[in-house]
Image (cartoon, grey):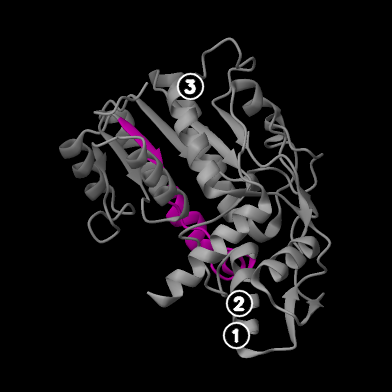
Amino acid sequence: MMNKKSKIYIAGHKGLVGSAVTRLLQKEGFKNLILKTRQELDLLDQKAVTDFFKKEKPEYVFLAAAKVGGIMANKTSPANFIYENLQIQNNIIHQSYLSGVKKLLFLGSVCIYPKLCPTPVKEEYLLSDYLEPTNEPYAIAKIAGLKMCQSYNRQYGTNFIAIMPANLYGYNDNFDLNNSHVLPAMIRKFHEAKASGQKEITLWGSGKPRREFLFVDDMADSCLFAMNEFDPTAKQNENGEIFFNIGAGKDVTIKELSELVKKIVGFKGKIKWDKTKPDGTPKRLLDISKSKKLGWKPKTNLAEGIKMTYDWYKISQKS
């Protein structure tokens, strides 16, 4: 278990999840955090990562660094998504093993699961069917990272674990309309439409797909919980798996989400749906019974989380 003096490396500490983990650790009194920007440490550079681990020798690693994006980004840059994520994972996981890291937490994604698997999605559905084509390269990279952690545990006796979160949102999210996820994109679209006095905005797809959204501060809380409490060899982990799902426990349609964001932002116009654009997976709700059994559950409801995210977004636009 980590203590307040433990040497902890947060890979991707400027991103959505990494920044939330960093805030929580600092709030909890952890003083010995290793934080490197992309300019200070290029995680795609094998030699740079090797030299970093030899010099710093972290005891614990939160692997939150990744190339992420929404449907359009995945569609237009599939090679970038598979290459960069595989490279980052390979470098950090392998060097964590070589340098004797006590425990590593790998951040996965809900998209590792098949497109049409039953819902709620259980951990054992992994690799049971075809993936969603629009984000397959990213999903394959994440599956490879999970299997890499599992393989190193089996062969070398490492303590590498992973968690698979639902769609995340919150402070420090990416609001770029070209490569962001659905919720931050909606917040920006509604905000700008309100500011410019638009009477109507257009959203992608039919609005029918169902999605589950988890506030990033809850995600950070689950990361700390997993690092301190989750033991892949413990009896309660019946299948000996190294990962479990993290989610809100409920989903909404994209249309319902749009109405909620519209209300919170205060946009008074109409919503038009462009059905020529892709919907993605029809339904994606995680089974979180395993995480609850282990002793973790989410704290923030969707409306509260969106309001806090929108408040942060407005402040960030002024700075």
Could you tell me the amino acid type at mark 2?
His
Across and down, in percent, residue 44 comes to 34, 54
Q: Which residue is mark 2?
A: 191
Could you tell me the amino acid type at mark 3?
Glu
Across and down, in percent, residue 205 comes to 78, 70
Quadrant where the N terminus sits is top left
Across and down, in percent, residue 67 comes to 47, 57
Q: Residue at x 74, y 37 (%)?
A: 121
Q: Secondary structure at mark 1?
A: helix
Residue 313 seen in this snapshot: yes
Q: CA distance from mark 2 to mark 1?
A: 6 Å
- Where residue 70 sits, quadrant-wise, is bottom right
Is 174 inside the magenta-drawn segment?
A: no
Left or right: residue 108 versus residue 211 is left
Left or right: residue 139 versus residue 58 is right
Q: Secondary structure at mark 3?
A: helix
Which label is found at residue 195?
A: 1
Across and down, in percent, residue 161 comes to 48, 29
Give the magenta-colored segment's residue range.
60-86
Q: Tell me whether the residue at label 2 lies in contact with that at label 1, contact meaning CB atoms closer than 8 angstroms.
A: yes
Q: Secondary structure at mark 2?
A: helix
Q: Residue at x 58, y 71 (%)?
A: 76
Is 64 inside the magenta-drawn segment?
A: yes
Residue 87 seen in this snapshot: no
Q: Is residue 211 above or below residue 119?
A: below
Q: Is residue 2 above or below residue 306?
A: above
Q: Which residue is mark 3?
A: 229
In-front residue for pair 94/289? 289
